Amino acid sequence: MIITSTDTVPGRQVAQILGLVRGNTVRSRWFGRDIAASLKSIVGGEIVSYTEMLTAAREEALQRMIQHAQQLGADAVLNVRFATSPIMQNTAELLAYGTAVKLG
């Protein structure tokens, strides 16, 4: 399966658009991470625990989007994007979405 942020695949033609596919996950922060993050914000630098949490959440959302595309019989997902939105205090949704297509 080809996953790309572009609207074309070099050397290939889009034969059929199967539709929008998406995958999401909702994550919450852990109180212990907030304490560590608060301390880190005093001295500056990367908050590694948050980086790791968001990296894992993006990967999970991406894999769910790929599964959705596979269910439709897609060869590729074009124009892949990520979005994040708050759900409630200390939680956020990470969404991966794109256009599932059959290639010719």
Image: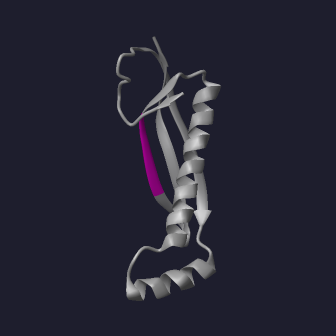
Q: Nearer the viewer, residue 22 or 1?
A: 1
In the image, residue 86 sits, relative to residue 64, either above or below, namely: below
Q: Is residue 83 magenta?
A: yes
Is 51 in the magenta? no
In the depicted structure, whether residue 30 falls above or below residue 19: below
Q: Residue at x 60, y 49 (%)?
A: 60
Name the one closer to the observer, 19 or 29: 29
Q: Is residue 8 left or right of residue 74?
A: left
Q: Which residues are magenta?
A: 79-84
Residue 59, image x, y percentages: 56, 49
Q: Quadrant for residue 35, please give it.
A: bottom right
Horizontal and vertical percent position of residue 47: 47, 74
When the figure is inspected, residue 25 is found, relative to residue 10, above or below; the finding is: below
- Residue at 36% x, 16% y is 11
Give the position of the C terminus as an image quadrant.
top left
Image spot of residue 41 (x, y percent) = 42, 83
Q: How many marks?
A: 0
Q: The N terminus appears in which quarter of the rendering?
A: top right
Up-down: is 84 above or below 64?
A: below
Residue at 64% x, 27% y: name it: 71
Instruction: Name the residue at 54% across, 64% down.
Output: 52
Q: Residue 57's x, y, as percent?
A: 57, 56
Dominant secondary structure of the magenta stretch?
A: strand
> Which color mode does the image show?
one colour
Q: Nearer the viewer, residue 92 or 36?
A: 36
